């Protein structure tokens, strides 16, 4: 997937949430600072504007208008979504709870209110409908996006939900399923504590 101004790590990059050396190497390979703005993710819809690196508190979406300030979220089945405009960039952590409460539209709204004309979006790897087995309490939150796993149980097409929420934006979709892809971290596959990073920056 080509997504200027964003990068999505894999298991080969190691756990960029906790491994400082791995983060330094990943940042260098993408030509960005290793000092990122991050948040303590809580599966909600809180959006924070940041202008310095470090912990921005409890939130599931960050955006900035600052050059040389990467913003990042960490995932291992939830979807990372980056939003890009000429004068700002944002990133959201969107699992089914975040998608249900509209964290991605909330990020776009906050960026727009800050004077950023959001032009395009990138959806990174996350758990696909092929593997996202859910119960009726989740299904009822996403009418029109029901699917079936490869083993025949009910699932939800979360990338389809997010694409619908992104509306008229140009979208690049990674398309890889974290549970299927052994080169990606997946909590559902093996309860890993490791996380991949989705990083966005003004390019």
Image (spheres, grey):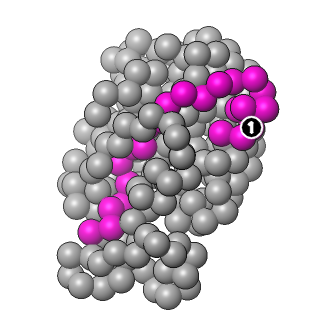
**Quadrant in the picture for the N terminus:** top left
Residue lying farthest to the right in this orientation:
113
Question: Is 115 in the magenta?
Answer: yes
In this image, 103 relative to 82: left or right?
right
* Residue 187 quadrant: bottom left
Of 67 and 105, the residue lying toward us: 105
Task: Tell me the residue at 72%/32% (across/down).
Answer: 112
Question: Is 138 in the magenta?
Answer: no
Rendered location of residue 201, percent (x, y): 53, 21
Report how many numbered discs are placed on residues in the image. Answer: 1
Rendered location of residue 111, percent (x, y): 70, 32
Task: Tell me the residue at 22%/48% (across/down).
Answer: 183
Rendered location of residue 37, percent (x, y): 63, 30
Q: Secondary structure at mark 1?
A: helix
The segment highlighted magenta reads 108-130
* Residue that numbered label 1 is attached to: 110
Residue lying farthest to the front in this orientation:
168
Of 29 and 176, the residue lying toward us: 176
Can residue 130 be seen from the camera position used here? yes
The crowd level at tag 1 (other Cα within 10 Å; few <14, some 14-19, many 20+) is: many
Task: Tell me the residue at 42%/58% (across/down).
Answer: 160
Of 52 and 154, the residue lying toward us: 154
């Amino acid at each position: 997937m080509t997504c200027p101004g964003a990068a999505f790590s894999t298991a080969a990059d190691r756990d960029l949430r906790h491994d400082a050396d791995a983060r330094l190497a990943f940042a260098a390979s993408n030509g960005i600072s290793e000092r990122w703005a991050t948040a303590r993710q809580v599966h909600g819809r809180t959006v924070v504007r940041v202008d310095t690196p470090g912990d921005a508190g409890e939130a599931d979406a960050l955006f900035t208008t600052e050059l040389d300030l990467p913003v990042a979220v960490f995932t291992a089945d939830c979807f990372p979504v980056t939003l890009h405009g000429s004068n700002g960039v944002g990133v959201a952590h969107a699992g089914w709870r975040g998608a249900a409460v509209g964290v991605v539209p909330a990020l776009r709204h906050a960026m727009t209110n800050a004077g950023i004309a959001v032009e395009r979006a990138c959806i990174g790897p996350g758990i696909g409908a092929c593997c996202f087995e859910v119960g009726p309490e989740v299904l009822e939150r996403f009418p029109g996006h029901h699917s079936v796993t490869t083993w025949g149980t009910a699932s939800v097409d979360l990338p389809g939900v997010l694409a619908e929420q992104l509306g008229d934006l140009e979208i690049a979709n990674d398309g890889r399923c974290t549970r299927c892809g052994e080169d990606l971290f997946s909590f559902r596959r093996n309860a890993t504590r490791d996380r991949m990073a989705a990083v966005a920056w003004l390019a």
